[in-house]
Amino acid sequence: MPIAKITGKFRKTIIRDISFGIGSGLILGYVFWEFEHKPKFAKIDAYYKNLAEQGPNAKQPEL
């Protein structure tokens, strides 16, 4: 029984690993941006918008 060739196995493994790493990074980056970053800065923007509407001498609301 002859031994099967292993040609291309290393290259396929490298391509799979790099593709998985880039794909996972993009998905996790999107999840972070949508569910962590945007809500946090929306809250901060609303605070400063409220502060600007009240004028310079108004009491500052809690953040």
Image (cartoon, rainbow, N blue to C red):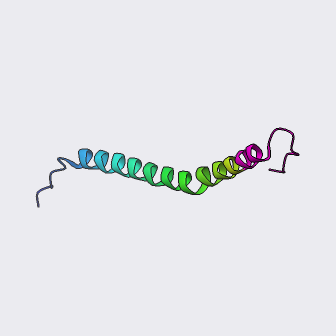
Quarter of image, res 35: bottom right
Total marks in image: 0
Q: Nearer the viewer, residue 17 or 23?
A: 23
Q: Nearer the viewer, residue 9 or 27?
A: 27
In percent of the image, x 67 and y 47: which residue is there? 45
Q: Is residue 50 left or right of residue 61?
A: left
Percent position of residue 47, x then y: 74, 49
Q: Quadrant of the N terminus?
A: bottom left
Where 15 falls versus 34 (above or below)? Answer: above
Q: Is residue 48 left or right of residue 30?
A: right
Question: Magenta includes 55?
Answer: yes
Report the span colored magenta. 47-63
In percent of the image, x 84 and y 50: which residue is there? 61
Percent position of residue 6, x then y: 19, 50
Question: Magenta includes 48?
Answer: yes
Which residue occupies the extreme left position in the image? 2
Percent position of residue 23, x then y: 39, 52
Percent position of residue 41, x then y: 64, 48
In percent of the image, x 15 and y 55: which residue is there? 4
Q: Is residue 16 left or right of residue 50?
A: left
Which residue occupies the extreme top position in the image? 56
In percent of the image, x 74 and y 43: which residue is there? 52
